[in-house]
Amino acid sequence: MLSFRKAALLAAFILTVVYFLHSSTSTLSIPTEASPNSPTDTPAKLKQDYDSTTPKTTAISESSVARPYPPPRQASNKKQTAQQQPLTEVVTKNLRDELAYQFEYDKAGKFPAYIWQTWKTTPAQGGFEDNFRPAEASWTELHPGFIHEVVTDNEALYLLKHLYASVPEVIEAYEALPMPVMKADFFRYLILLARGGIYTDIDTTAIRSTTDWIPEEVPRSTIGLVVGIEADPDRVDWKDWYSRRIQFCQWTIQAKSGHPVLRDVVATITEDTLRMKKKGTLKAKKMEKSIVEFTGPAVWTDAIFSYLNNPTYFKMTDGKNITWETFTGIETAKKVGDVVILPITSFSPGVQQMGAKEPDDPMAFVKHDFEGERF
């Protein structure tokens, strides 16, 4: 006869056996569709299941079986399209958009403390002309904290290749220009677009520091470009002498990198150059345009006026365009948007015409000697 203790142990054993038998029967009642752990799920089958946009329907919930791979994802075609950008759109991106992306314009930033000049040789080389030395030194003397670079014609290409490596059509255009003077013109726009600061011709003399160029009451955080008037001809035959009624000089320019005017002039010259190259008219003696119109003060002046009249940047509240009449005869600096226009005296003192005053005038900042010809 069993004691009470033995009977209790026997009953517990019997209940345990019954429980395990019942659990085994329940597991075996799963539908016969292959389990994810089954040998029938080959690597190819698993990949097909993972890539499928429609999950398989089974009698078992996903959570009841641990998968050896992520569950199938139901992807929306619309969402996938939004995440991917076709390669053709990247390749055909507008040149101006590409330049804007590569060289961002920060109007509120400071003017970079660079002085850029370019010539056949540097002051440290023996071939540098003695008559240029006092003019070149004047920029360093009046701007003691600035980095002053005289870039040779040979060095310019390597510098530009570094700065514009991501915009190869610009380099192609620069190399294709058939005359040194055109490359010198193009270089000033390119270096200011990429790095900002002051560009000034090798035959210019600094009369006053750049700190005096902008009126004290004008915050420099609201200015991105400073230019001077080269010509303001008040004569009926002005077209015989100048390309524009008001012509802005480009022998001295101060700018913050990425300024839209620089972007526009770089894009215009690049597009014109490559078009003429393809057409076979990019030759020194077979040009469609004069140097002044192609790379000089005419295209520079047009870019400035185009910017000042662009509704993307300016709201014309009175409905009037900015024209030569806006600037003719000015004797002090005039601010339009983020551009400061200086009177003819500022960068052309002593020319004894068009209202220009002498180099000792308070508004005289830079003197141009017109000796640095490079044809």
Image: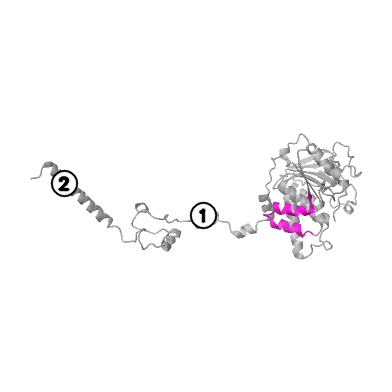
Q: Nearer the viewer, residue 86 or 9?
A: 9
**211 falls in the magenta region:** no
Residue range in magenta is 151-177
Is residue 242 rendered to the left or right of residue 89? Answer: right
**Residue found at the far top of this picture:** 217
- The residue that disc 1 covers is 79
What is the CA distance from the residue labelled 1 to the residue labelled 2? 62 Å
Magenta stretch secondary structure, dominant: helix
Of callouts 1 and 2, the N-terminal one: 2
Mark seen at residue 11 = 2
Q: Which image quadrant is residue 352 in?
A: top right
What amino acid is found at the position of numbered circle 2 in the picture?
Ala
Quadrant showing the N terminus: top left
Q: Amino acid at mark 1?
A: Lys
Quarter the C terminus occupies: bottom right
Q: Residue at coordinates 51% horizontally, 54% vertically from top-left?
A: 79
Residue positioned most to the right? 352
Q: Nearer the viewer, residue 191 or 49?
A: 191
Q: Residue at x 71, y 54 (%)?
A: 161
Tell me, yes or no, if residue 232 can be seen here. Answer: no
Q: Is residue 330 above or below residue 303?
A: above
